[in-house]
Image: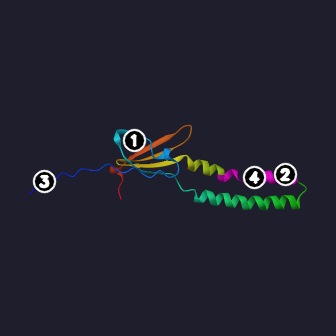
Amino acid sequence: METRVAVRSPAPSPPTTGTPTLLTPAAPDDEAIVFAITPTLLFVKGGYALAAAAALLIVALIAGLTNISVLIAIVIGLLLFLVPAYFHIRQKLVRYTLTDTKLEVASGLVASTTRNVPLRRIRT
């Protein structure tokens, strides 16, 4: 009877679609990054579509029913895009990274915060 030792092969690198900077930072203690992801922008895109529809409606109503100039009505309509832009920026500043041993949640731009959750503490 022969005894064999199983050797773990190095984990393949995750695909680098999009921005490769999210997947290439070296993890401490030679941890292999399984994947890195950011929150979905599906609802933000919906917010942009809703803001565009509301902006068109407001510009039409202000320009047609009041004596306010069309240029001011357009500026008021464009201000509606500040709400989805705020949520867009907020979601782009969050990144989730799964490594061999932990789940890392990084957020923030100027004052960045990183939370590490060891995988052994996560229960299903």
C-alpha span from label 2 to label 4: 11 Å
- Mark closest to the chain's N terminus, 2 or 4: 2
- The residue lying toward the viewer, choosing from 5 and 63, is 5
What percent of the width, then of the height, locates residue 49? 68, 60
Is disc 4 surrounded by few (<14), some (14 to 19) or many (20+) residues within 10 Å?
A: some
Q: Can you tell which of label 1 and label 2 is closer to the viewer? A: 1
Is disc 1 surrounded by few (<14), some (14 to 19) or many (20+) residues within 10 Å?
A: few
The quarter of the rendered structure image containing the N terminus is: bottom left
Left or right: 88 as drawn, with respect to 11: right
Left or right: 2 as drawn, with respect to 115: left
C-alpha span from label 2 to label 3: 81 Å
- Mark closest to the chain's N terminus, 4 or 3: 3
Q: Are marks 1 and 3 in contact (CB under 8 Å)?
A: no
C-alpha span from label 1 to label 3: 34 Å
- Mark closest to the chain's N terminus, 1 or 2: 1
Q: Amino acid at mark 4?
A: Leu
Q: Which mark identifies residue 27?
A: 1
Q: Which mark identifies residue 78?
A: 4
C-alpha span from label 4 to label 1: 42 Å
Pointer 3: what residue? Answer: 3
Name the residue rendered at 84%, 58% in the picture. 62
Name the residue rendered at 36%, 53% in the picture. 122
C-alpha span from label 1 to label 2: 52 Å
Q: Amino acid at mark 3?
A: Thr
Q: Which residues are magenta?
A: 69-84
Q: Magenta segment, principal secondary structure?
A: helix
What percent of the width, then of the height, locates residue 75? 79, 50
Q: Secondary structure at mark 2?
A: helix
Is disc 2 surrounded by few (<14), some (14 to 19) or many (20+) residues within 10 Å?
A: few
Colour logic: rainbow
Q: Is residue 103 magenta?
A: no
